Image (tube, helix red, strand yellow):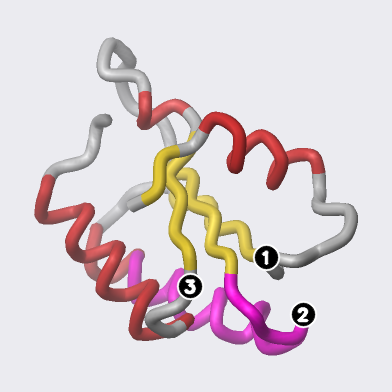
Amino acid sequence: MRLSEKQILTIKNLIRNNFGEDAKLILFGSRLDDAGRGGDIDLLVLADFTEEELFLRKLKALGQLQRALGDQKIDLLTAVPAAESPAEVVKIALKEGVSL
């Protein structure tokens, strides 16, 4: 995984602060490949909120992540854990990602 311990701790704390203790955080995508270089930070947050509330929390969290981690591309996806038909990217993140 190509994130430092400090970056992981920062991400976890900011997600917990914005989405609550019960939110599930998953890292997926290119940052899981230790042999790779660069790439954005792909995150999925599963939390029990309405779509509107998830969107508002996502915007706030993204701003905080950008300030804390610096000039990096961060893709933050949000979804409800019990969604009946999640988006394909959510399915991939759940299958291939790593819980933080």
Instruction: Point out the image quarter for the N terminus.
Output: top left
- In percent of the image, x 62 and y 85: which residue is there? 56
Residue 71 falls left or right of residue 39: left
Q: Which residue is mark 3?
A: 23
Classify mark 2: residues with Cα within 10 Å, few (<14), some (14-19) or many (20+).
Answer: few
Q: Which residue is mark 2?
A: 51
Label 3 to label 1: alpha-carbon separation: 9 Å
Q: Quadrant of residue 32?
A: top left
Task: Return the disc, 3 or 2, that comes first in the chain's sequence.
Answer: 3
For the residue labelled by badge 2, is the local secondary structure a helix, a strand or a loop? Answer: helix
Q: Is residue 51 magenta?
A: yes
Q: For this rendering, which residue is in front, 96 or 14?
A: 96
Task: Return the disc, 3 or 1, that comes first in the chain's sequence.
Answer: 3
For the residue labelled by badge 1, is the local secondary structure a helix, a strand or a loop? Answer: loop
Label 3 to label 2: alpha-carbon separation: 15 Å
Q: Which amino acid lies under the numbered mark 2 shown in the image of this protein?
A: Glu
Q: Which residue is mark 1?
A: 81
